[in-house]
Amino acid sequence: MQVKDTKELKTLSIRLTTSVSELPKIIGEAYEEIMAYMQHEGVQCSGYPYVLYHNMDMNNLDIDIGWPVQHDANGEGRIKPSTIPGGKVLFATHKGPYSTLEDTYKEVMAYIEKNGIKTTEWMYEMYPNSPQDTPPEELITEIYFPVKSE
């Protein structure tokens, strides 16, 4: 775990509300929709796919699902241009199946409390590899908690 600086990322995303139980299906559908649009429009990715969580209500998650892009893009339908703000973040990496992410989150929350770090209400995850072609024990999830500026 470390506090580090990040740069603002231009993105294309779909914002929606879902329950945690529907998350895997919803994420897969959104990534496919965004990728089809990007291929059709010739928009290039500039990073890993992500999910940005505006809240932690497991029955009513308010999320953005998307991809960082190299240049501004207009979007279409429910696909909108957006950004992930830059700044200081508490960064952690989880290796293993998504079903064990909770263990890493417990460590992150304990670190935040122990060190008196103030974070924003929102956070995001990035996914450098895919469950479609990576064994569950090799999956990587990057976790970003933006730190509130004093």
Image (cartoon, rainbow, N blue to C red):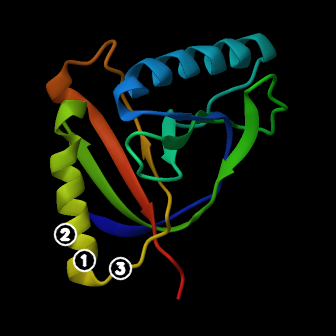
Q: Secondary structure at mark 2?
A: helix
Q: Which residue is mark 2?
A: 110
Vertical relation: 111 (above or below) 97: below
Residue that mark 3 sits on: 117
Residue on which the image places disc 1:
113
Q: Amino acid at mark 3?
A: Ile
Task: Give how far across and how far down residue 4 sits, in percent.
Answer: 42, 68
SS at mark 1?
helix
Q: Is residue 86 above or below residue 12?
A: below
Q: Residue furthest right?
A: 74
Name the residue type under label 2. Answer: Ala
Rounded to the nearest whole Å, what is the CA distance between mark 2 and mark 3?
10 Å
Residue 71 picture location, percent across and down: 77, 38
> For mark 1, does the 10 Å Cα neighbourhood hold few (<14), some (14 to 19), or many (20 or more) residues?
few
Looking at the image, which residue is at 34% across and 12% down?
A: 132
- Outermost residue toward the front? 59
As measured in the structure, the alpha-carbon distance from the residue carrying label 2 to the one carrying label 1 is 5 Å
Q: Residue at x 42, y 49 (%)?
A: 57
Secondary element at tag 3: loop
- Report x, y in % for residue 134: 26, 18
Residue type, numbered disc 1: Glu
Q: Is residue 38 left or right of residue 63?
A: right
